[in-house]
Image (spheres, grey):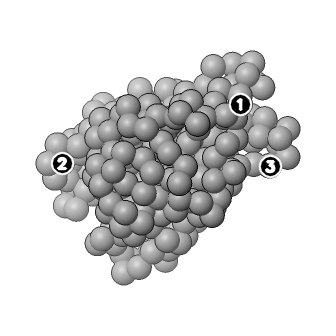
Amino acid sequence: MTAEVTQLWRHPIKSHGREAVQTVTVNPGQTMPGDRVWAVAHEASEADGSAWVPCANFSRGAKAPQLMAISARTDGDKLTLSHPDRPDLSFAPDSGQDAFLDWVKPLMPTDRAASARIVRVPGRGMTDSDYPSISLCNMASHRAVGQKLGQELSPARWRGNIWFDGAPLWEEFDWLGRDVKIGEAVFHIREPITRCLATTANPETGKRDADTLAALETWGHQEFGVYAEVITGGAISVGDKVELL
């Protein structure tokens, strides 16, 4: 297998924006730096920033597809969020949540619990997994889903961290329980990622326009990508090789 990294993405606020990077240094037992540092708790949430809690406690793309069209740009302790239907917003998530809540309100369905506060757990990215994970996604699998649907899909639908190309379709599922070296880092592949309605929304428009889940079902599952745990830290850059150990 001669696969290599084609894209690296972080999502500073869980479900609220994506940001491409060219290089990143990962650390053992931690999420990707800058990824899901914050999350947006809704009115019915039990999240208070004291510990990791499941994704049902947060505003997210599965329930609010417009959130999928947010992109992010990090500048020091400030974030700038962009959306096709909203003016850009620059703010500090740790201190400027009132401006953020006003900005995001028009993007939220009125029949869902409203976004209430930004939370963070120091040293712990708010991944969907109950352990600090980094997601790996295969471009061949992505292309196959698009071909099944007869439309071109953006990889941003899957909100993955590390994208690679050059491996066979669904090869990543054969890596479960194995170790993979990417750049200087080594990952242990823990489990496949079960997908939700967030992936049906177009990340350019925030509108649901592709039945990605039905496409996945044709292979007998609703899984795309794998969760990995960092066991050896190091730098990873676009163009680095992906090697099964």
Gap in Å between the C-alphas at discs 1 and 3? 12 Å
From what the image shows, is residue 143 above or below residue 105? Answer: above
- The image shows residue 93 at horizontal and vertical percentages of 25, 56
Q: Residue at x 58, y 36 (%)?
A: 1
Q: Which mark is residue 221?
A: 3
Relative placement, left or right, of 25 versus 229 is left
Circle 2 sits in a helix, a strand or a loop, which is it? strand
From what the image shows, is residue 42 above or below residue 91? Answer: below
The residue indicated by pointer 1 is 145
Q: Nearer the viewer, residue 180 or 155?
A: 180
Q: Amino acid at mark 2?
A: Lys
In this view of the protein, can residue 34 be seen by the observer?
Answer: no
Q: Quadrant of residue 79?
A: top left
Q: Earlier in the sequence, mark 1 or mark 3?
A: 1
Q: Residues within 10 Å of mark 1 (few under 14, many from 20)?
A: many
Does the residue at mark 3 contact the one at mark 2 (Cβ under 8 Å)?
A: no
- The image shows residue 24 at horizontal and vertical percentages of 29, 47
The residue indicated by pointer 2 is 78
Q: Nearer the viewer, residue 48 or 137?
A: 137
- The image shows residue 132 at horizontal and vertical percentages of 44, 67
Q: Residue at x 17, y 43 (%)?
A: 75
Q: Residue at x 53, y 33 (%)?
A: 2
Q: Residue at x 45, y 74 (%)?
A: 52
